[in-house]
Amino acid sequence: MRLTSKILGLMAATFSLPAFAQDGLEIIGTPKEGGLGFQPAATELARDLQWLDGMILVIITFITLFVTGLLIYVIMRYNKRANPTPAGFTHNTPIEIAWTIVPILILVFIGAFSLPVLFKQQEIPEGDVNIKVIGNQWYWTYEYTDYDFGFDSYMIGYPATIDESTRPEDANVKPYILDAAMEAKLEDAGYSRDEFLLATDTSVVVPVNKVIVMQVTGADVIHSWTIPAFGVKQDAVPGRLGQLWFKAEKEGIYFGQCSELCGKDHAYMPITVKVVSQEEYDAWLSAAREEYALAPASFAVASAD
């Protein structure tokens, strides 16, 4: 696996091919250094959000240019030198009506497009796969409720992932520090140094082109589960169940991070989602049901609540 990752990494650097990681999956949803704009949209929800953002950007750009031009015109036309005798009127009814009605029309126009996008996010369809997400300080617990198993997911390099008994090389790994030892640990997991602080030891695995419904809650404080490329984000509030859904349209690996300040290790609480074919998902599911038959302690406590 390490050799394969290095070869693929060399190919990506040489021929500008997309990066690949575990199981040969393309890394799609990841932040880029110096990048501008959104991550590639992998769901209909994300495409809607990105289109809406672009449309509103055009509107506010025209408004900004209009107001700026108007200010410049007023400064040049009505300064003391060009207009030594100022007008004495106090108001202009037609203009006041216009600057009241026009903004209302603009807001109605924006609302006519934004509300359907919002409703599409909030109207939760029936899920092909149902997953319960529990935010903890500072890791995530996932329960596949259709099959009664769950697991914890930690950032690679978090203290809980450093275990010399299963990987002797972990003796040289320092938590949170990206050095040669940490890079080797990432490579052993099928990632590269570029995925440091993003990759997790256990990923959420879902099938492509299937509706995934997630119930999101918190075990201690408020967290927030989000995958930018999916266009989803939901706060994980203790004692409450939030919901989100998505339907990923392209196989690959997607990253997110806790998006609600939740304590000292908030920055080390990433999310990894692998979107695979139905055949690969079925194979993973069969193995996962056996591997995670005994739920982690954190999952058992959260479920009891």
Image: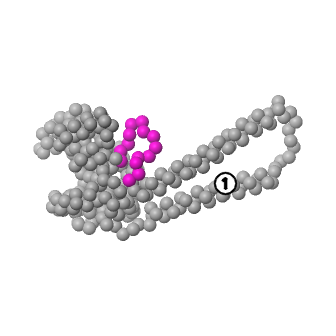
Q: Which residues are magenta?
A: 29-42
Q: In the rendering, at what x and y percent does residue 275 appear?
A: 29, 55
- Say whether residue 180 is left or right of residue 263: left
Q: In the rendering, at what x and y percent does residue 17 appear?
A: 31, 40
Q: Decide which of 64, 139 is in the foreground and name it.
A: 64
Tell me, yes or no, if residue 90 can be seen here: yes
Residue farthest along the top direction in this orientation: 81
Element on which disc 1 rests: helix
Picture quarter with the C terminus: bottom left
**Above or below for 207 versus 139:** below
- Say whether residue 185 is left or right of residue 197: left
Q: Does residue 36 belong to the magenta stretch?
A: yes
Tell me, yes or no, if residue 232 can be seen here: no
Q: Decide which of 46, 89 is in the foreground and name it.
A: 46
Residue that carries the numbered disc 1 in the rendered image? 103
Q: In the rendering, at what x and y percent does residue 271 appear?
A: 32, 50
Query: What residue is shown at x 40% (from left), y 48% (from top)?
Result: 40
Query: What residue is shown at x 36% (from left), y 60% (from top)?
Result: 247
The answer to which image quadrant residue 181 occupies is top left
**Above or below for 3 versus 226:** above
Query: What residue is shown at x 42% (from left), y 58% (from top)?
Result: 44
Picture quarter with the N terminus: top left
Q: Does residue 153 belong to the magenta stretch?
A: no
Given the image, on which type of amino acid does mark 1 rest? Pro
Color theme of the render:
one colour
For the stretch drawn in magenta, what is the main secondary structure?
A: loop
- Say whether residue 103 is left or right of residue 225: right
The answer to which image quadrant residue 205 occupies is bottom left
Q: In the rendering, at what x and y percent does residue 90 appear?
A: 83, 47
The answer to which image quadrant residue 109 occupies is bottom right
